[in-house]
Image (tube, rainbow, N blue to C red):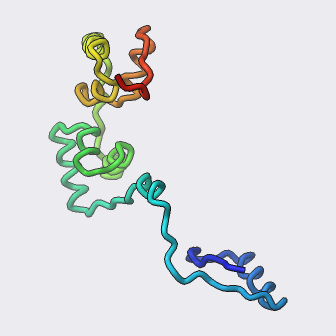
Amino acid sequence: MRLADSLSNPSTPLLRLIKTLERRGAEVRVQREPVVADPAVATEIKENRKLSPDKVAELVGAYRQGATLSALSRHYGLHRQTVDQHLTRAGVAKRSMVKMTSARMATARKLYEQGWSARQIAVELDVCASTVSKKLKRAGVEMRDPHKHG
Protein backbone atom coordinates (compact mmCIF):
# COMPACT_ATOMS: atom_id res chain seq x y z
CA MET A 1 0.00 0.00 0.00
CA ARG A 2 1.39 3.43 -0.89
CA LEU A 3 0.50 6.47 1.21
CA ALA A 4 1.47 9.94 0.13
CA ASP A 5 3.31 11.93 2.76
CA SER A 6 2.27 15.19 1.19
CA LEU A 7 0.12 15.74 4.27
CA SER A 8 2.32 17.82 6.54
CA ASN A 9 0.22 17.04 9.62
CA PRO A 10 -1.47 13.66 9.20
CA SER A 11 -4.62 13.31 11.26
CA THR A 12 -4.85 10.99 14.24
CA PRO A 13 -7.21 8.61 12.39
CA LEU A 14 -4.74 8.35 9.51
CA LEU A 15 -1.86 7.61 11.88
CA ARG A 16 -3.99 4.91 13.58
CA LEU A 17 -4.75 3.38 10.17
CA ILE A 18 -1.07 3.24 9.25
CA LYS A 19 -0.18 1.59 12.59
CA THR A 20 -3.02 -0.93 12.21
CA LEU A 21 -1.86 -1.83 8.70
CA GLU A 22 1.72 -2.20 9.87
CA ARG A 23 0.65 -4.47 12.79
CA ARG A 24 -1.22 -6.70 10.36
CA GLY A 25 1.92 -7.12 8.29
CA ALA A 26 1.00 -4.80 5.45
CA GLU A 27 3.92 -3.05 3.85
CA VAL A 28 3.30 0.67 4.16
CA ARG A 29 5.51 2.70 1.85
CA VAL A 30 5.61 6.43 2.12
CA GLN A 31 6.08 8.48 -1.00
CA ARG A 32 9.33 10.44 -0.67
CA GLU A 33 9.57 12.12 -4.07
CA PRO A 34 7.69 15.41 -4.47
CA VAL A 35 4.23 15.30 -5.96
CA VAL A 36 4.22 17.01 -9.35
CA ALA A 37 0.96 18.70 -10.21
CA ASP A 38 -0.62 18.39 -13.61
CA PRO A 39 0.72 21.46 -15.53
CA ALA A 40 -2.78 22.27 -16.80
CA VAL A 41 -4.01 22.51 -13.22
CA ALA A 42 -0.88 24.15 -11.85
CA THR A 43 -1.27 27.16 -14.16
CA GLU A 44 -4.67 27.91 -12.59
CA ILE A 45 -3.20 28.19 -9.10
CA LYS A 46 -2.21 31.71 -8.17
CA GLU A 47 0.75 32.43 -5.98
CA ASN A 48 -0.22 33.63 -2.51
CA ARG A 49 1.36 37.07 -2.49
CA LYS A 50 2.22 38.71 0.82
CA LEU A 51 2.95 42.41 0.87
CA SER A 52 5.64 43.77 3.15
CA PRO A 53 4.55 46.47 5.61
CA ASP A 54 6.34 49.03 3.39
CA LYS A 55 4.36 47.90 0.33
CA VAL A 56 1.09 48.02 2.30
CA ALA A 57 1.92 51.58 3.37
CA GLU A 58 2.70 52.41 -0.29
CA LEU A 59 -0.64 50.87 -1.37
CA VAL A 60 -2.52 52.86 1.30
CA GLY A 61 -0.78 56.07 0.25
CA ALA A 62 -1.61 55.47 -3.41
CA TYR A 63 -5.27 54.90 -2.55
CA ARG A 64 -5.36 58.10 -0.50
CA GLN A 65 -3.91 59.95 -3.51
CA GLY A 66 -6.77 58.73 -5.71
CA ALA A 67 -5.76 55.31 -7.08
CA THR A 68 -8.70 52.94 -7.53
CA LEU A 69 -9.02 49.44 -6.07
CA SER A 70 -8.81 48.01 -9.57
CA ALA A 71 -5.66 49.93 -10.42
CA LEU A 72 -4.01 48.91 -7.13
CA SER A 73 -5.08 45.31 -7.70
CA ARG A 74 -3.37 45.26 -11.10
CA HIS A 75 -0.27 47.11 -9.88
CA TYR A 76 0.38 44.84 -6.89
CA GLY A 77 -0.89 41.62 -8.50
CA LEU A 78 -3.55 41.16 -5.84
CA HIS A 79 -7.28 40.44 -5.93
CA ARG A 80 -9.47 43.52 -5.42
CA GLN A 81 -10.81 42.03 -2.17
CA THR A 82 -7.25 41.64 -0.85
CA VAL A 83 -6.55 45.30 -1.61
CA ASP A 84 -9.82 46.20 0.13
CA GLN A 85 -8.80 44.16 3.19
CA HIS A 86 -5.42 45.92 3.39
CA LEU A 87 -7.21 49.28 3.33
CA THR A 88 -9.72 48.16 5.96
CA ARG A 89 -6.96 46.90 8.28
CA ALA A 90 -5.17 50.23 7.84
CA GLY A 91 -8.34 52.06 8.91
CA VAL A 92 -8.75 53.84 5.58
CA ALA A 93 -12.14 55.40 4.88
CA LYS A 94 -12.99 54.05 1.45
CA ARG A 95 -14.49 56.12 -1.32
CA SER A 96 -17.81 55.08 -2.77
CA MET A 97 -17.48 52.80 -5.75
CA VAL A 98 -17.68 54.21 -9.24
CA LYS A 99 -21.27 53.99 -10.38
CA MET A 100 -22.41 53.19 -13.86
CA THR A 101 -23.98 56.58 -14.52
CA SER A 102 -26.24 57.07 -17.52
CA ALA A 103 -23.32 58.68 -19.41
CA ARG A 104 -21.06 55.71 -18.61
CA MET A 105 -23.85 53.31 -19.61
CA ALA A 106 -24.22 55.09 -22.93
CA THR A 107 -20.48 54.75 -23.51
CA ALA A 108 -20.57 51.07 -22.53
CA ARG A 109 -23.50 50.36 -24.88
CA LYS A 110 -21.84 52.21 -27.77
CA LEU A 111 -18.54 50.37 -27.29
CA TYR A 112 -20.30 47.00 -26.96
CA GLU A 113 -22.25 47.64 -30.18
CA GLN A 114 -18.92 48.46 -31.87
CA GLY A 115 -17.69 44.98 -30.97
CA TRP A 116 -15.82 45.62 -27.74
CA SER A 117 -15.99 42.87 -25.14
CA ALA A 118 -17.36 43.48 -21.65
CA ARG A 119 -13.83 42.95 -20.34
CA GLN A 120 -12.39 45.61 -22.69
CA ILE A 121 -15.13 48.04 -21.71
CA ALA A 122 -14.49 47.32 -18.02
CA VAL A 123 -10.82 48.21 -18.43
CA GLU A 124 -11.76 51.40 -20.29
CA LEU A 125 -14.27 52.46 -17.60
CA ASP A 126 -12.22 51.07 -14.68
CA VAL A 127 -15.01 48.83 -13.39
CA CYS A 128 -15.47 45.06 -13.14
CA ALA A 129 -16.36 43.15 -16.30
CA SER A 130 -19.26 41.52 -14.44
CA THR A 131 -20.64 45.00 -13.68
CA VAL A 132 -20.54 45.91 -17.37
CA SER A 133 -22.24 42.65 -18.38
CA LYS A 134 -24.96 42.93 -15.73
CA LYS A 135 -25.72 46.56 -16.51
CA LEU A 136 -25.86 45.95 -20.28
CA LYS A 137 -28.21 42.97 -19.79
CA ARG A 138 -30.46 45.02 -17.48
CA ALA A 139 -30.52 47.75 -20.13
CA GLY A 140 -31.89 45.20 -22.61
CA VAL A 141 -28.75 44.82 -24.70
CA GLU A 142 -28.62 41.43 -26.41
CA MET A 143 -25.35 39.92 -25.28
CA ARG A 144 -23.01 38.02 -27.59
CA ASP A 145 -21.67 34.58 -26.66
CA PRO A 146 -18.35 35.44 -24.94
CA HIS A 147 -16.87 32.12 -26.09
CA LYS A 148 -17.54 32.76 -29.79
CA HIS A 149 -14.82 34.57 -31.64
CA GLY A 150 -15.50 36.41 -34.85
Residue 80's x, y, as percent? 35, 43
Residue 126's x, y, as percent? 26, 30
- Number of dots carrying numbers: 0
Q: Is residue 35 left or right of residue 43?
A: right
Outermost residue on the front side: it is: 150
Residue 125 figure quarter: top left
Q: Is residue 4 left or right of residue 135?
A: right
Q: Nearer the viewer, residue 85 or 77?
A: 77
Q: Residue at x 28, y 38 (%)?
A: 70
In the rendered view, tell whether residue 85 sits above or below residue 37: above
Residue 88's x, y, as percent? 35, 47
Residue 117 figure quarter: top left
Q: Nearer the viewer, residue 149 or 81?
A: 149
Where is the C terminus found, in terms of image quarters? top left
Q: Residue at x 46, y 54 (%)?
A: 40
In the rendered view, tell whether residue 52 sits above or below residue 70: below
Outermost residue on the left side: it is: 65
Q: Nearer the viewer, residue 99 or 148?
A: 148
Q: Residue at x 37, y 49 (%)?
A: 82
Q: Residue at x 36, y 46 (%)?
A: 79
In the rendered view, tell whether residue 83 sits above or below residue 135: below
Outermost residue on the top side: it is: 140
Residue 129's x, y, as percent? 36, 29
In the rendered view, tell whether residue 149 sits above or below residue 83: above
Where is the N terminus found, in terms of image quarters? bottom right
Q: Is residue 149 left or right of residue 106?
A: right
